[in-house]
Image: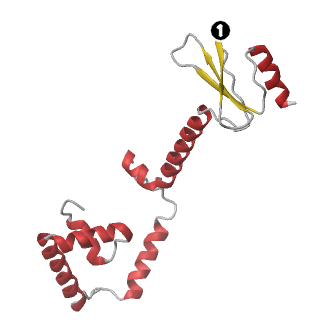
Amino acid sequence: MKAHHSELISALVDGELKGLRRWLVQRHVTRCAACAAEYRHFQHVRELLAANPVTSTMSDSPEFFWSKVKREIQAREGQTVNVPVPALGLSDWLGQNRFVLASAVAALIAVVVLVFAMQTPRQNSNTVVIIQPPVATVEHASTFIANTVATTIEATEAEPAVIWVSGLPWTPDMTEMKTQFAQLDS
């Protein structure tokens, strides 16, 4: 709570605030001298009202009063009453439908995450990806891992593609290498 709101301080005194809002207003009242004074004033007024309850006086007996109310209700029984309905603004609608709004936001986030997840290519560790440029020079490099070779395919692009093959004999012929890759799936 950054601003001084008498309504919130009064609601705090009356016990109408719950949860986070109550904690924020209590914290503000303990740190702001003006609001602390207003809080004490509201408490004092509440104590005075509790000590001096209002007594209602009726000119009629309670039975006679309720008989008049009953007669008035029966007299207006068939009448239609037009009650004006206030127009709700966006903030009123959001206040009444905050769960709908939260659900819509959660669904939107889920859709965005799903779209990004589907756009990200996933590679399986058992999948071999072959990049074949139009013009390529194949070179062989031995590795320190047994039965493993590293093959670079230099193309017209800026960086060469590297294919790691495990357990296959080395061949400089790309057609032969494709055949060996195809046999891996069999």
Kindly indicate the quadrant of the structure image that contains residue 83: bottom left
Residue at which label 1 appears: 134
182, 108: nearer the viewer: 182
Which residue, as the protein is rendered here, is positioned at the far top?
A: 135
Residue 133, above or below 114: above
Residue 171 placement (x, y as % from top left)? 76, 19
Looking at the picture, which amino acid does disc 1 mark? Pro
Which quarter of the rendering shows the C terminus?
top right
Left or right: 38 with respect to 56?
left
At horizontal 38% and vertical 87% (from top left) the residue drawn is 62
- Judge the density around disc 1: few (<14), some (14-19), many (≥20) Cα neighbours within 10 Å: few
Residue 166, above or below 13: above
Left or right: 128 with respect to 159?
right
Task: Tally the marks.
Answer: 1
Residue 55 placement (x, y as % from top left)? 26, 88
Which quarter of the rendering shows the N terminus?
bottom left
Residue 19 placement (x, y as % from top left)? 38, 70
Residue 123 placement (x, y as % from top left)? 66, 35
At horizontal 59% and vertical 39% (from top left) the residue drawn is 114
